[in-house]
Amino acid sequence: MRIAGRLPFALWCLAGIHLLVTFAGFVAPYRFDTQERFQSFAPPTRVHFFDFNGTFHLRPFVYAVAGGDENSNEYREDRSAMYPIGFFAAGEEYSLFGIWPCHRHLFGVNAPARIYLLGADGFGRDQLSRLLYGGRVSLFGGFLAAALSVLLGLGLGAIAGFYGGRADDVVMRVADIFIVVPWFYLLLAIRAVLPLQIQPEAAFLLVVATIGFVGWARPARLVRGVVLSQRERTFVLAARGFGASNLYLLRRHILPSAWGVALTQMAVLIPQFILAEVILSFLGLGIGEPVPSWGNMLAYAQQYHILISYWWMLLPGVAPVPVFLAYHGLADYLHARLQSVS
Amino acid sequence: MRFRGKSFWVFILLVVGVAALLGQQAFPQDWLRSTSEAGRPGGKLAFAERAEPKTLSPVTALDRPSRDVIRCISGDLIHINRYTQKTEPALAKSWTISPDGKRFTLQLRHGIRFSDGAPFDADDVVFSFKVYLDEKVHSPQRDLLLVSGQPMTVEKLDAYSVRFTFAAPYSVAERVFDSLAMLPRHLLEKDYAEGKINQAWNLNVTPDKIAGLGAFRLKQFVPGERLVLERNPNYWKIDAKGQKLPYLDELTFLFVSSQDAEAIRFQAGDTQIISGLSAENFAVLSRDQQSRNYKFEDAGPGLEYNFLVFNLNDDTEGRLPQVARRQKWFNDLLFRQAVSSAIDRSAIVRLVYRGRGVALASQVTPGNKLWMNPALTVPQYSIAKARQLLQSAGFSWNQDGNLLDKEGLLVEFTILVSSSNAQRNQMATLIQDDLKHLGMKVQVVSLEFRAATDRVVQSHDFDTALMGLAGGDVDPTPSMSVWLSSGQTHLWHLGEKRPATPWEGEIDQLLQKQLATLNYQQRKRLYDRVQQIVAEELPIVCLASPHILVGAHQDLGNFRPAIIENYVLWNADELFWRIPAGNH
């Protein structure tokens, strides 16, 4: 089915967030792994319009900050020089879509000043840049895993519902097993038997594949239900009477009615799987340093001193909230549309 | 009759009284008089351990929590003062060493009793050493009691003197007696005869079945929660004013899960003394030092050294082709030197230890003033020099700046690190970034502690590993098993039949020589050379050592942290509360 009419606000939000993380290289002022070892746990940089004389500047600027003594994390602004924020400024090299090398960033300041809108972590890496890059892993990881499990569910659910009998029994019993398997232990076991060295990309795909593969059972059940009821509809019976093949029936008449269920399922599953990735990385089973994901960034907040001293280190835990709200909004919208259509 | 009967009892009483007086004169109790500040008795103290002790038996204890508890409930013959790092009399009030350095004659204190009231004498000493030296018992202390493969012999001269004889002069001398707990023969002889000494005094033991010569004795053990010790009424030390030690009525060990939990329990007031604080928690807790009546102390560098070890094992060929391929690089000294000079040690000290640590030149930390080789300097951080070294070793860079070896293979390897240690994980992330500047692709693999150790010690399936070791004593002898090519913890190359390289052969010779040398200056020269070889040949790249960070309640008297284990409880018998008990 097609979703017509005004797109909901939730979809715009999601599109915006995904656009931001897709162009993380451009939006982020720094790379995710650039360490600035004299800016460990630097607090969010203050953006000024007035200098200390009270003079107004149209272009916002920042001061360089320097630590006091090396045992403390107290930073003071060095007001001897102003560093205006440059827009579309040249900075560190990144590659757009992994192909084109690029130097332009949405904003940036000249060295030695650094702009940490959301503070820096223990290695002096920009938390905003890491959040954006980390969002790629977490958001697209969740999306891909959900797509994988919905596709699997669609295929297997259709087979089970359409052919019935033995095929139905086998698929549904396997689905039951997948639902009751404690997948967390499964993941622990998988990680333990893998070789030590896996590239971050491979680790990412592995996490996606595991989460997606484990989660196909619920969508498969839903799709089977839809297919079961569709199979007995008069238009299907009529088409069968005209000699339509099974494949034609599935493709033309039955699966299209399951699309809606599949889409709604996806909107429900994505946040679940994003959370799964966050939990996995939080426990050290996901993507490894220095590649960020919201989960492995949040893992730092396990440390007591970070938890109570640096609030900006908790932002990766807040970042998923708007995403989840948007996805739930979208799921509601899809559900409502489906009801009104059918 | 009645009168006579009464005087009879008076007479008996008199006889008993005189006999008791005479008895005391004949065998006066030899108290050990402490010179520390005299305190007041009473009060309780709690300390958090990061794990439960595995046993209470001094014969089998290996893990730190077990050893911490055992130190409080047992006594040794000669003790190393953790503060001065020198030996001092304990259960032996004096000793003489024969001129050839092979024979030790120890005089025991008279009138000492175990915590259950049974007397202690030379028979207990002989029994204890029989147990430690028994090969079937597999006591971890046994290795230290052998000189050139020969066990020491023990003979009883009389009830209060014992003679120990070594096969060759033994450089550690009387330090060897430290932490060898004297065992009560009357309780353990039966277990030993039945071959069950290893099961004795496990955590199921009831307080009446266990006795020791320490300041405290077992009162209660609650699995998973706490272990409570109470004052040993038969302890053999008195303070400057003649009061019996220890002062504290009770000493409790709480079991918590992590370093952070330790800090939180201390902040909550559940424990009143803490050691092994991370620099970050030290900073956090120090902030409200004043308002909460704590005092914190930075005791300076300890003996722990953290290092990057290269896998130089030679049993990987065929079995682990990937590892064997990478070992071509690790076996190249120039490669190891390049890695060493590309690591920014000062950044490790600054970021991981918040400045409360030191960069290392060798495995001996500046905390070990007696044995550090002052001629060695911390390798200078220089990417340029590292690149030069790699170039001269035949490495090159492709246009993306990635490092290639002679055969054009991309230089990629992993750093294995235990996930439970946050500091070492941070170090690994820093090193990963440092080595990126050389074009090396390094991945940090953080595994659970056991899994990580197994790979290093058992399967040898790793490239490099980031680890830490801490000696129990300043003397180099107890840590020889790391450096001898045949040693059990010779981490970079285990199970060598004979030294695999000439320099490992030289280290073996130097160490054996220092073991039989009695003169400190000569030993120092030998060990200086060992450190120099390690710094030059770099089987391990020494990185940094954290300071020992400790804290206690303001009112705790005689709180004197040391840099040797146990950092704060080594003088538990002298700790006391300045304000009346009940306020804690």
Image (cartoon, grey):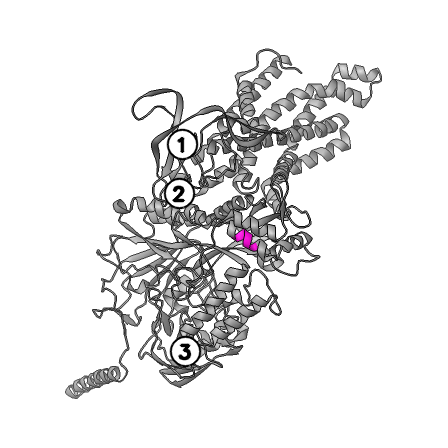
Which of the numbered marks, if any, corresponds to residue B124?
3
Secondary structure at badge 3 equals: helix
Q: Quadrant of residue A109?
A: top left
Look at the numbered discs 2 and 3 and tell me whether their residues touch, using CB distance below 8 Å: no
Whole-percent x and y of residue A327?
55, 24
Whole-percent x and y of residue A16?
54, 21
**Identity of the residue furthest to the right in this view:** A243
Q: Residues within 10 Å of mark 1 (few under 14, many from 20)?
A: some
Whole-percent x and y of residue B571?
32, 64
Residue at label 2?
A305
Q: Quadrant of residue A309?
A: top left
The magenta stretch spans which residues?
A: B336-340
Secondary structure at badge 2 equals: helix
Amino acid bearing label 1: Pro
Look at the numbered discs 1 and 3 and tell me whether their residues touch, using CB distance below 8 Å: no
C-alpha separation, residue under disc 2 versus residue under disc 1: 18 Å
* Residue found at x 38% / y 70%: B212
Residue B133 in the image: above or below residue B250:
below
Task: Say yes or no: labels 2 and 1 on the same chain.
Answer: yes
Residue at label 1?
A44
Which of the numbered marks, if any, corresponds to residue B570?
none
C-alpha separation, residue under disc 1 versus residue under disc 3: 66 Å
C-alpha separation, residue under disc 2 versus residue under disc 3: 49 Å
Q: Residues within 10 Å of mark 2 (few under 14, many from 20)?
A: many
